[in-house]
Amino acid sequence: MLSFVAQRIVKGVVVLLAIVVMNFFLIRLAPGDPAVVMAGEAGASDPQFVQQLREKFSLDKPLPEQLLSYVKGIVTLDLGFSFRQQMPVSKLISERIGATLLLTLTAFAISLVLGIFFGTLAARFAGSWGDSAITAAALVFYATPIFWLALMAILLFSVYLGWLPSFGYDTVGANYTGLAYVGDVALHLIMPAMTIGLFFMATYTRMTRASMLEVKRLDFVKTARAKGLRDNVIQRRHVLRNALLPVVTLAGVHAGTLIGGAVITETVYAWPGIGRLMYEALLQRDYNLLLGVFVVCSAMVLIFNLITDLVYRLVDPRIEFAS
Amino acid sequence: MTAAPAVSIKNLKIALPKGAERPYAVDGISIDLIPGEIVCVVGESGSGKSMCAHALMGLLPDTVSTETGEIAFNGGNLLKLDEDGWRDVRGRHIAMVFQEPMTALNPLMRIGDQMMEMFEAHNLLTPKERRAKALGLAREVGLPDPERIVRAYPHQLSGGQRQRAMIAMALALEPAVLVADEPTTALDVTTQAQILKLIRDLQRRRNMAVMFITHDFGVVADIADRVVVLRYGKVVEEGTAAEVLTRPQHDYTKALLAAVPSMHPPVRAPLEGREKAVEVIGLDKTYVTSGGWFKPDRSVRAANEVSFDILQGETLGLVGESGSGKSSVARLVMQLIKPDRGTVRLGDSDLTKLTGRALRIERHRIQMIFQDPFASLNPRRKVGNIISDGPIAHGTDAKVAMQRARELLGLVGLDAGAMERYPHEFSGGQRQRIGIARALALDPEIIVADEAVSALDVSVQAQVLALLEDLKARLGLSMLFITHDLRVAAQICDRIAVMQRGVIVELKPTAQLFASPEHPYTRELLAAVPGQSAPPQAA
């Protein structure tokens, strides 16, 4: 197993480097010159100042040279300097990544637990009105755009009911400490996490339901019945475990993309995560920051893929390590 | 034997859902299962034999319902039981072994755990005792290295070992009745012989009543004490094995027995002086599964120095068990996969040297008929298109190709109306005829038939074999006939090549191979063919 992990890490690093190179060029293909944007914002648009800015940030060097120094930086975990924010990119990202991980992992957990629960329930009572209700609700959440769901949730829970805060990570100026602070963050977390969570929950519900109904028809379920096992044992041990295999695959794909997928939610709820950071960097042509966010997101995808593969190998003995 | 029956099925009627091809799946069947006796329930697909087995376990699908009848057991009627009552019976008093041991075992659970579930289901023994019992059972059914096997997952076992594990599981609680639903159909012939012997031995040792469902009269001859022949859900004949097999009364039984291919090859026309239609020289093919960066690759040698000729008008049989490489050889000959080394020559052209367009042009000379008549026809295309697609791809005018398709349907015994219909509207045998028509559409010189009759009922199988023989003679075809069934091979092949682990171990004229097999593996295969002790009467 160790050799499998080592091998995957080596491969992951190679993939990451390829992504860095591609993104590096891709960003520079987009129209717009960061030096011009910066000079414009500084109120000085004379060519000399722009040229100065270019030299300051090495934007005047040939592209391969810029790439080489960027890659060299990454190897030493230096993601460069953000011209706009006047701060190292790694510092900017590390300040924000905690909030994003909190949001996305909470959303992920909610979606998996609720999705599998409702999917199992729907499959168990397939064809009943309960099944129809769950399937219909899943379809609604699946089809609703996240930003709209977010806005409606704010309207309902913040504006009309006044139960939940409508934006931010914590209450500004409240200076809570200890448990009170945790409670405050949790309160702020509920809506954004549910907004993302409900969308993914819908896919897991549908997947779990379909997969369970398929497994139910397989021969080994009949064997289990022929043993005289109780129905709930059969459902849990024989049906659910086998039915979860495709759900694990899907969840693995989602887990990697969740971080990038939080952009909309973070923007609507003013959640100080890297999704919003990326959004700002994009508008400001902040090349280094944007690239930095991409690198971190790519690394996350790779890490979650590795975790998925490990989990998959744990739940399915037919897949052997390093094969 | 006059012992009291362990289970009596009395006048059982199982209704099919409305709109089915007949009202009853099982139509008034009565069968007694007596301790110490094996009753073989024989019939073709759709005869209702599996329904009977499932009714005994209370495992009928939701779509059917038992209308009348009784299953008498232990002084009660099983059909009156509720789900809790059934759960108590299942596994403990009546146990079942299924056809396909790979799918009948949970792939995510260890063999030992699945065995232990039998005790758990009925709240018997402590976990530790269950483990010890599982080990003992594994030993009793002759699983090698039981300590390792109980910790293994199903995919780590061979087909025969999996079926032994299933049998061990079924016997765990010493049931009075064992229901075996085609338990050897998915197994190789040598493995089948071992499993039949195992069931026989265990049944005697434990004085069980066994209901053995099968479609194979060879198996019946080997294992049955009593035989019940079913057709369309009704019993057409019943009696001791000797009576039914040697003096069948009902016409249907006679027809079924007559359709079983005999082990005695018929006399065939001599082949001297014929030209070679296909020349296969030194084919090598090794499949390599990449082991990753830190593990060695795993390789399987599917074909090892395989050489043979097929003469014009000859049928060469390629027999062997699963994994012997016979299907790989078929695909190599067809150039569906490329060999590592070796040559396939049709007349004067070397197929292995051709690529791209040149190969595509030559492909029409050699065509294939597949095993599974359901999977081998595109369900979304009409039969007329399925047959004419090949010729049209080779440049024939669409109208001409369609006309030819109509003629071909006539040739294989279907009417021209089939052109406008879809594959699902046909039975298995009819579909196989469509598959044959499709192969013939390109006017091939050689037909490769890969287990082409294995999925068919014995009576249909006989018809398709006769059709193949007839077409071969009429159209002057040569044939590579791949089969695991030596009885079929005996009837249709001029010569037979026996394959084992990628190597042809023996190649001889059919009569000679059956009369004096030389290689130990050939002898083993021949000895394992079921039903030789009491050969059914051949037509």
Image (cartoon, rainbow, N blue to C red):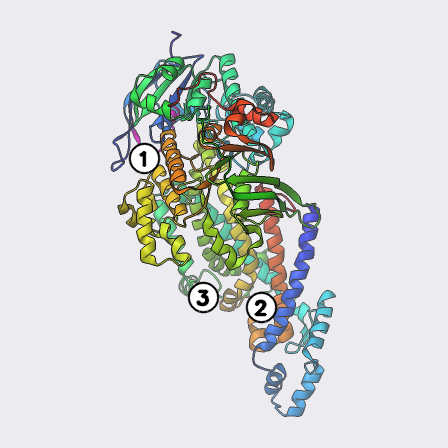
Kindly tell me whether residue B172 is visible in this rendering: yes
Q: Is residue B26 magenta?
A: no
Quarter assignment of residue A76: bottom right
Amino acid type of the residue tagged 3 in the rendering: Phe
Query: Residue A147, labelled with which disc?
Result: 3
Return the x and y of residue B530 as percentages of the image width and height.
48, 22
- Image quarter hosting the C terminus of chain B: top left
Q: Please provide the residue range marked out in magenta.
A: B53-65
Q: Nearer the viewer, residue B486 or A81?
A: B486
Residue B266 in which image quadrant: top left
Q: Residue at x 64, y 91 (%)?
A: A47
Q: Residue at x 71, y 69 (%)?
A: A71
Tell which tag, 2 or 1, sits nearer the viewer: 1
Q: Is residue A92 left or right of residue A216?
A: right
Structural distance between the alpha carbons of marks 2 and 3:
28 Å
> Residue B464, located in which quarter of the rendered image?
top left
Q: Residues under labels 2 and 1: Cα distance?
A: 66 Å
Do dots 1 and 3 share one subunit? no
- Residue at mark 1: chain: B
Residue bearing mark 2: A173
